[in-house]
Image: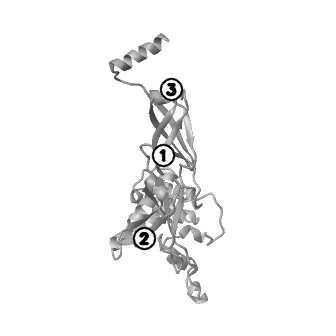
Amino acid sequence: MASKDFYKTLGIAKNASSEDIKKAYRKLALQYHPDKNKGDKIAEEKFKAVNEANSVLIDPEKRKLYDQYGENWEQVQQGGPAGGGASGRPRTTRQQPPFSFDASDFENDERFEDLFSQFFGGQQAGRGRAPRARNGADLEAEVQISLEDAFNGMTRMLSLGTEQYRLTLKKGVREGQQFRLRGKGQPGQNGGKTGDLLLNIRIAPHPRYTRTGNDLRCKQSVDLVAAVLGGKARVPTLHGEKVMTLQPSTQNGAVLRMRGLGMPVYDTSGSFGDLYVEIMVEIPRELSAKERELYEALREL
């Protein structure tokens, strides 16, 4: 059995997909990130453990070896015996020359220097060779805003642990747009650069409008007389209340376009999409005696 259960570390099942591994890793990496837990040694150790577990499970070949050999997977990968003393254990099918390994396999692994010394003895110090710098990985998070925020543009302060960051969004920001906070991801190693924090925009559903690109759609109730004879209807929009002209015999379900009353075009001053209004004709629920008389007369005609 493995002395470290990488699946338990990430809180996932042994049959977890690559996407499940990525999700669990991003969540835990954000939770235990040093910027959010300054001076917390327990969080620091958990952050390292999460990185170690992810570096193995996200790699299909390493994961296969880990699932088969547990804590001995690295020995097997290097072509050594899996059990430490037994000589009849299976080995990997990949043929490698003596003492060869891929240094990238040990990214974010503090045992790299120890393993290097184990294979090459004092040669590292003799050559004055410094450990290779490695940049920190990027982290991702979601920021949910309202449609009105996307329409007007906004500035929001984001809190990550004890740190606060200012995020400014221009008018017309879209669902799925990504913004980068540089230097707020995982710390680098051996002098490498800190990774970035990637913020993905999510726009909350709106009770009245649906959005397609820069255009908006909504439904608008109009009275029966205005639909039959033509007239005016007042329509609430994100630009304020506007007057819409109805032509005679406007049908229920008809869609009318109000030009320039949609969303702002991102990063383009003065440019807007359109608003498409679906007409919902209201049928009177109660009629006065005079109204009934008139409708009866209309039916006779």
Q: Position of residue 197 (x, y in %)?
A: 49, 67
- What residue would you read off at disc 3? 228
Of the numbered discs 3 and 2, the one sitting upstream in the chain is: 2
Residue at position x 55%, y 29% from top?
248
Q: Position of residue 162 (x, y in %)?
A: 35, 72
- What residue would you read off at disc 1? 242
Q: Nearer the viewer, residue 92 or 155?
A: 155
* In front: label 3 or label 2: 3
Which residue is outermost to the top?
300
Label 1 to label 3, Cα distance in Å?
21 Å
Q: Position of residue 137 (x, y in %)?
A: 52, 68
Label 1: how many Cα within 10 Å (few below 14, some 14–19, many 20+): few
Q: Nearer the viewer, residue 193 or 144?
A: 144
- For the residues labelled 1 and 2, say whether their Cβ atoms are less than 8 Å apart: no
Vertical position of residue 90 compared to residue 137: above or below:
above
Residue 264 appearing in the image: yes
- What residue would you read off at disc 2? 165
Give the amino acid type for the residue marked by disc 2 in the picture: Tyr
Q: Is residue 38 left or right of residue 61?
A: left
Circle 1 sits in a helix, a strand or a loop, which is it?
strand
Label 3: how many Cα within 10 Å (few below 14, some 14–19, many 20+): some
Vertical position of residue 182 compared to residue 247: above or below:
below
Vertical position of residue 16 compared to residue 190: above or below:
above
Circle 3 sits in a helix, a strand or a loop, which is it?
helix
